[in-house]
Image (cartoon, coloured by chain):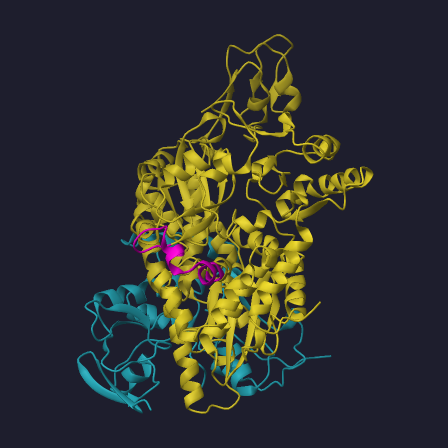
Chain colours: A cyan, B yellow
Amino acid sequence: MADPTIQLTVDGQTVRVPAGSTVLEAAKACGRTIPTLCYHQRLDPYGACRVCQVELTSPGKSKGMLVAACTYPASEGDSVRTDTDEVREARRFILQLLLARAPNAKAVQALAREYDVTLTEDSPEPFQAYLGATLKKRMAEAGPEGLTQCMLCGLCTRVCREVVGRDAISVVARGPNRRVRTPFKAISPSCIGCGACAFVCPNAAITITRATE
Amino acid sequence: MNTLTDRESIALHRERVVAREAGKIRIFVAGGTCGCAAGAGGVKDALYQELERRGLLAKTSLKITGCHGFCTMEPMVLIARDGCLRIMYRHVRAEDAAEIVEQSVCDTRIVERLVYTDPESGEKISEQERVPFFRLQTRRILDWNDHIDPLEIDDYIALGGYVALANALGMPSGSVIETLSRAGLRGRGGAGFPTAVKWTLARGAVEQNAKAGVESAACYIVCNADEGDPGAYMDRSILEGNPHSVLEGMVIGAHAVAGGLACVQKGYVYVRAEYPMAIRHLSRALTQARELGLLGENILGSGLSFDIEIVKGAGAFVCGEETALLESIEDRIGEPRPKPPFPVISGLWNWPTVLNNVKTWASCRYILDKGAEEFAAVGTDGSKGTMVFALVGKVRNSGLIEVPLGITLRDIVEKIGHGVCDGGHAKAVQTGGPSGGCLPASKFDMPVDYSSLAEAGTIMGSGGMIIMDEQTCMVDTARYFLNFAVNESCGKCTPCREGVRHMHDILVEITAGRGRPEHLDMLDRMGRMIIKLSFCGLGKTAPNPVISTLRYFREEYEAHLAGKCPAKVCTALIQYTILETCKGCGVCLRKCPVGAISGSPRELHRIDPEQCTKCGICRKACKFAAIEVN
């Protein structure tokens, strides 16, 4: 039988965790913080936002690779680095993309500040300037409050399925058109009005109103 | 139908089938989806009526087969007599049936006008084997397509079908995997993972479950037929023309991965609903295989129990990604799962699952029939065997080809493909569809194998191969593929959903003449980040068309920044003008769909640039080459 625990290092610190733990859980076990947006400890790992990138070097490998800490299983002898230049650059890229989608999402704004991400036309970084220009155009069309607060982390749809045991809301459509919706945008017949989706949303993008027949 | 109860009964059944057909003149009409679209159905009906009228039905065997591969020559008819090379007729119409029967069935003459003519020498070549398009190929997976009515299992058995399965069932499971390992077979779906390694890992997982006495343990064998690359139809043509070769490979896989172990086994073929003929032929093949006892309980007396079910995909490209495909089979939204764990360890309903492409399964059949050495006799050190490509684009002989790995792109384009249409020059070859890249003419002498293609910045992919000439704009091509990726991204992860969309938007800006110098490095950097950070294979490869064209055709991007489209494709950057040589015939004026051309008869005409939509109809219509595009 496999060893019930494994040992690895996170930022040089040795840690022993149960076999089957993710890299994120291993990092948490030794007190390292990795930013996450779509992770929730009561839900299955999802790996969608990609902000929890870390550099992982497997034993016997000379070069590390970027992995999403929330889904990647930790293995015996792994060496994890949570704050290299490459990791930081990767997280910034993800935050730039998310902020451009959902500039009013509070969770994204907070991390963006921490990672010095600002989407303005006059940013010295060409990509930020580009996103800033497109954002300004979209804001002019939609008004400052018209842009979405949803960062498509899927916490709401997953809490509904995995914790509440309903499927009252789901993601619909593909690619950039992806949205969270009730079936056919109508009052969901399986919604029990528990409010778990609104509670778990870090961006206050969901409001619960009383359904009138 | 008698059930085949042991391995020897395959050979006996084959003898019966061959004896039944012995001495007949065999007539094959190529009738894949492509052939049918070109009129193969009408040709077959006309041939049947003619044979009936002459009382020849008993002496002949008329079959509609799958695709033979030579798309530009459809509809095609082959006539085979014992001891003779097969006669090939191309561009056959129903009206030709009487003459074909009279000359080539009643007699042994050739209908000259229906014979392939070599465009260089003008030589008439009547035998299929001597036509350069076929002669230069190594057809192992495709060759049976020529002779099989895909709705008749006996046709397949007559050629030696299910011999490979009988061979495999006579070997211990480990030896089957070892045979694949010696053959050096790598996955034909795109990534090229060694098939024997995949099966070994799966067998290990199944063994572990069996050892641990896991209750109701299962193991799944899956065929990925969710072919979705634009311009690719290899997998469809194999399923349409020779479905049993895939099924046989899957049964061999079931024996290799879980033979003799306590676990429930089941197979799935995941095929797009857009492939109705493939689904029809596959369903029929499953029914017939069950009737003969080649699927079901205790196959050929070996103790192996295995059946296969068809699952129809609803047309999402991402479902070709292995874990999204599994989600879809489990009736969930087609979105990828995290890897690891890999499907061989935890796949369908968390049981070990072997997932291979259509061509990989068909190759397994070949290897267990002919042996590992025969399979590995062609190819390079790291890439053994043959690969099927859909050769399309600006090439004269477009079609389905099977070539030994290690062949050069130049041989494919110039010899098999017979060069570019309309006397142009091949500028680039695109492989791997939306996940692949474009290689320039300077790379045409490179061997086509997994590692060489990867080093050059593209991938083997599933077999799409698009030839491009000077009239293809590489920036517009990149934009086209990115648009495909934007539409087909599932939207689960941030880099693919958001990043690819921004890359696409920038390409739209560049092709519209609004590109800025900083855009090029920005595209390259974004592409590299998206490759590194995306969740699944779709996002990890989506930027390849941009990165490869930036690497090899950067000057085209720079020309666009300077306001020029060298291929004269991007409408915002080109202008149509009428030259002094205009005779004032008025053809262009009448043809212009937006009324942008004015002028009196026999006087110089003029195009109003404000109204012109740059469709190019006028230029094509002008008999005096008096319309210029700049």
Tell me: B43 left or right of B376: right
The mark tally for this picture is 0
Image x and y of residue B547, in percent? 34, 49
The residue closer to the viewer here, B222 or A40, is B222
Q: Residue furthest top?
A: B602
Q: Which residues are magenta?
A: B364-384
Which quadrant is the C terminus of chain B positioned in? top left
Residue at x-position 49% and y-position 30%: B421
Residue at x-position 77% and y-position 44%: B57
Quarter of the rendering containing residue B270: bottom right
Tell me: A20 left or right of B42: left
Quarter of the rendering containing residue A111: bottom left
| Magenta span contains residue B374 | yes
Above or below: residue B585 compared with residue B241: above
Residue at x-position 47% and y-position 38%: B135
The residue closer to the viewer here, B260 or B614, is B260
Image x and y of residue A96, in percent? 36, 62
Residue at x-position 61% and y-position 74%: B5
